[in-house]
Image (spheres, rainbow, N blue to C red):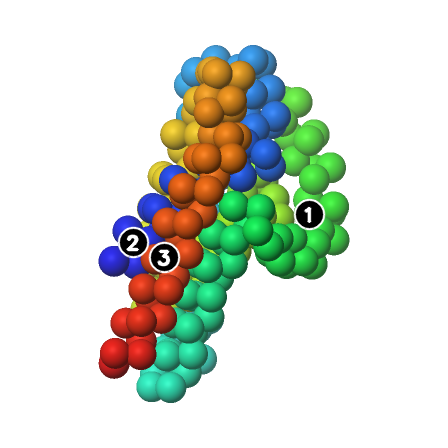
Amino acid sequence: MDLTTALLMGLAGAGHCFAMCGGLAAAIGMQNKRSRIYLYHLGRLSSYMLLGAIVAAVVDGLGLRMGLTHMVLRWVAGAFLIALGLYITNIWRGLVVIERIALPLWRRIQPLAQRIRRHDGLFMSYLAGAFWGWLPCGLVYSALTWAAISGNAINGALTMLFFGIGTLPAMLFASHFSHALRAVLATKGFRLLMGTLLIVYGLWTWAMLLMH
């Protein structure tokens, strides 16, 4: 179910992905061959998996998955899911605060990422995509809360892989058909539908905790 949650978060965040990274994905699509576009996204997913493995390993190593602490982490994961739903529907944008916290780190990484993106070569395309994965994003941080409770580094990486796969349709379409798909995913109706789905899923997570 946690992998399903991660996949759903990636799919539901399509509109947000366009707002945050649609321009970058479209630029990559215009400047590169199809094989290199896939390498960019493979690099991005690799970074997500690395982040998920690190977070899950830390939580597991500190023994935070036991008893009451694990329940608290589940409550936090549910809260992030609800916050993400509110964020996508534009009802409440509290996740922006978390994105701002990570901005100093991104300002250090961004110049290097831009220099790498200007170089040719398949590996450089992959590496540029890997740097892209560190872009401050409330959507990614919400997914990381689920990676944290996944049990171990391997499960954490899998959780973020499923999340990344969920973001692929929007990002790949942005690379090839940016204008047509953006018009659909940016509509208020789509954002409201997917945001509400995440809120319901987060509330369901809390309900399961209360039942236990």
Q: How many marks?
A: 3
Quarter of the image for the N terminus: give it: bottom left
Could you tell me if residue 66 is visible in this image? yes
Whether 119 is drawn above or below 134: the answer is above
Report whether 45 appears left or right of 204: right
Kind of residue at badge 3:
Val
Could you tell me which residue is drawn at 31 percent across and 71 percent down? 207
Label 3: state its secondary structure.
Answer: helix
Could you tell me which residue is drawn at 56 percent across and 13 percent down? 30
Q: Neighbour class for label 1 at 10 Å: few (<14), some, many (≥20)?
A: some
Position of residue 96 measured from the top left corner of the image (x, y, whole percent): 65, 53
Could you tell me which residue is drawn at 57 percent across and 51 percent down? 91
Position of residue 83 measured from the top left corner of the image (x, y, whole percent): 51, 58
The residue under label 2 is 3
Kind of residue at badge 2:
Leu
The residue under label 3 is 200
Residue at the front extreme, as displayed = 189
- Marks 3 and 2, how far apart at CA: 17 Å
Label 2: state its secondary structure.
Answer: helix
Lower sequence index among marks 3 and 2: 2
Report whether 79 appears left or right of 102: left
